[in-house]
Amino acid sequence: MKTPDLIGYEPNESNHMDMIGWLNTLEDLGVNIAKEFPAVHSANERVDRLLSIRAQHANAATDINIAARKIGIADDLDDTDAVLTYADHYAYADNPDHRARVSVLLTRAADFARGDALRRFRRAPILDIMRPAFDTLAHRIVTAAATIPQGVMNVGDAARLGHSDAYLQLERDIAQWKDTADLIGALHDAGVLVAVRPERWPAEFMIDNLDAQREASGSIDHPMRRAAGIAAGIPNLHIPTEGEVIPAAPLGSAEDTKTMWAAADANAADKAAREDLGLVSR
């Protein structure tokens, strides 16, 4: 009898691994996964348990003499059905084809549990679940933008002005903001977050006014400019419902020129602010 081939029996594995990564990012954001996704958490526990059982089965001893010895020295042989069930189990387990079929069954069961977890995750109100943690993150960023002086470019600058702790927290928060944007982009690409039109930037889910964000940030990537852009754009976690796709501005276009001028203005403002703060010589 041909041993069953296990390849191809886990069609949900790749998508489930993606979902585990999304859940880890949500947990990093501050979402209590067990509390907010109880059905998904339960399904994931079933996956883990089935895979653990499969591993135990694969590593279990199959020598039929072990079973025979246990039956031979057993004190209670009155329950004939129990003795036969035990003997049948070990007799079958001694057969490589049977062991392979059991592994196939457990593999398929674990993958069905993965599929159940994925379906339950897709049905969850993900943005509603994220919103409290997102609002807390956004509030810290907006507060930092208003508290740390404009022109601070690094932790050394911040330390000189007595804002090192706030700046270090801002660096962490901006990194978390980017991770959140990456998560939202991945969820949108996977069809978990569905907007009116298919092409969406993650920022459209996170900011109300993208033009104000770009103008204030100058499309510059250091933390204070990112924070200024987020604050100006008004953070708001939502499903975007209007507007056209915003393509990358072609080089030399009016939009590209506008972006260049915004960057130049932001750099000039930062330079002037640094001079006023005594962080650079005039």
Image (cartoon, grey):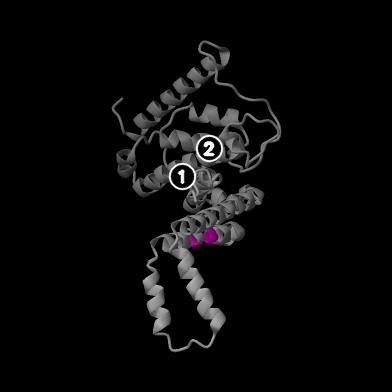
Residue at the (64%, 25%) spot, across then down: 245
Q: Nearer the viewer, mark 1 or mark 2?
A: 1
Identify the mark at residue 176; answer none if there is no mark: 1
| Magenta stretch contains residue 46 | yes
Whether residue 39 is visible, yes or no, is yes
51 lies left or right of 162: right
Q: Which residue is mark 2?
A: 230
Find the distance from the CA under tag 1 to the CA under tag 2.
13 Å
Q: Nearer the viewer, residue 230 or 190?
A: 190
Q: Earlier in the sequence, mark 1 or mark 2?
A: 1
Q: Nearer the viewer, residue 119 or 188?
A: 119
Amino acid identity at mark 2: Ile
Residue at the (30%, 42%) spot, across then down: 160
Q: On screen, 43 above or below 213?
A: below
Marks 1,2: beta carbons within 8 A: no
Crowd band around label 2 with a 10 angstrom C-alpha radius: few (<14), some (14–19), many (20+)? many
Q: On screen, 258 above or below 8?
A: above
